[in-house]
Image (cartoon, rainbow, N blue to C red):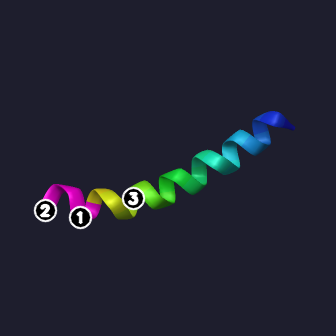
Amino acid sequence: FVSNGAAAADQSEIMDLRKVPVCLPTG
């Protein structure tokens, strides 16, 4: 079950990261 929790955490970070990179490259 730990793996499942880690996967969920990774997905959450990926979602945020995907939005962050959009601003970083422009900067």
Give the extent of the magenta segment: 22-26
For label 2, the SS is helix
The residue tagged 1 is 23
What type is the residue that disc 2 sits on?
A: Thr
Circle 1/circle 2 CB separation < 8 Å: yes
Q: Quadrant of the N terminus?
A: top right
The crowding category of the residue bearing disc 3, from other C-alpha atoms within 10 Å (few below 14, some 14 to 19, many at least 20), is few
User: Going by the picture, which residue comes out furthest to the right?
Assistant: 1
Look at the picture and state if 26 lies above or below 7: below
**Quarter holding residue 17:** bottom left
Residue 15 x/y as whole percent: 49, 60
Q: Residue at x 59, y 52 (%)?
A: 11
Q: Which mark is residue 18?
A: 3
**Quarter holding residue 3:** top right
> Is 23 part of what is drawn in magenta?
yes
Horizontal arrangement in the rendering, residue 8 relative to residue 27 (left or right): right
Residue 21 x/y as whole percent: 29, 56
Circle 2/circle 3 CB separation < 8 Å: no
Q: Quadrant of the C terminus?
A: bottom left
What type is the residue that disc 3 sits on?
A: Arg
Q: Which mark is residue 26?
A: 2
Look at the picture and state if 23 lies above or below 9: below
